[in-house]
Image: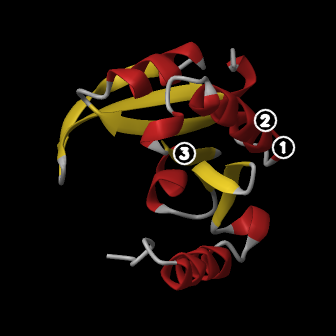
Amino acid sequence: MDGVESVEGFELWVARLVASSAGGRDGGCSYRWIVEGGRVLGGIALRHGDGEIVRKVGKVGNVGYGIRPSARRRGLATWALGEILAEAREFGMERVLVVCAAENLGSVRTIERCGGVLEGIRDAELGPARRYWITVGESRA
């Protein structure tokens, strides 16, 4: 548990994310926050570098995102995914992997709206997960 419920815990978590993002185009992650009126509504991350999947299939990235429940259904995830896909394009990535819980229909719609093509559903640590690939040059966000 990150202890992000407190201001101090959130600050420590953000500091850890910033430290892990070192490496820029050659490794790490790019983290972006969705903020409105000084309140964090969500975030999105683009993992890039020399991870196992990159070694296997080439110039790809992995995207993860989350939106505060009270800020959902406003198009923020679709907007953020479109923005991070543009960044992936700048990094020279050809496609990105986006995974969501199989029953998370909001994320399914977001990912598909942005050009996601379902690879399949696999068992994951937290339950069944849908795996989508988005060809970066074909983003529709």
Report if the CB atoms under discs 1 and 2 are less than 8 Å apart: yes
Q: Where is residue 91 in the image (x, y as percent from the top left)?
A: 79, 49
Q: Which of marks 1 and 2 is in front?
A: 2
Residue labelled with disc 3? 63
Residue where numbered disc 1 is placed: 90
Regarding mark 2 in the picture, which secondary structure is present there?
Answer: helix
Q: Name the residue under label 2.
A: 86
Locate the N terminus by quadrant: bottom left
Give me the C-alpha separation between circle 1 and circle 2: 6 Å
Residues packed near mark 2 inside 10 Å, few (<14), some (14 to 19) or many (20 plus): some
Real-space CA distance between mark 3 and mark 1, rounded to the nearest whole angstrom: 15 Å
Label 2, label 3: how many angstroms apart (C-alpha)? 12 Å
Question: Residue at 20% across / 36% down in the picture?
Answer: 122
Q: Residues within 10 Å of mark 3 (few under 14, many from 20)?
A: many
For the question of whether residue 67 can be seen, the reply is yes
Give the numbered dot on residue 82.
none
Please state if 35 lies on the left or on the right of 115 as rendered.
right
The kind of residue tagged 1 is Glu
Question: Camera-side residue: 10 or 60?
Answer: 10
**Residue at (61, 77) in percent of width and height:** 20
N-terminal-most mark, 2 or 3: 3
- The residue type indicated by label 3 comes to Val
In the rendered image, which quarter is residue 100 located in?
A: top left
Quadrant of the drawing holding the C terminus: top right
Please indicate whether residue 128 sits to the left or right of residue 139 in the image. left
> Taking the image as drawn, is residue 45 in sight?
no
**How many C-alpha atoms fall within 10 Å of the one at disc 1: few (<14), some, or many (≥20)?**
few
Q: Which amino acid does label 2 sit on?
A: Ala
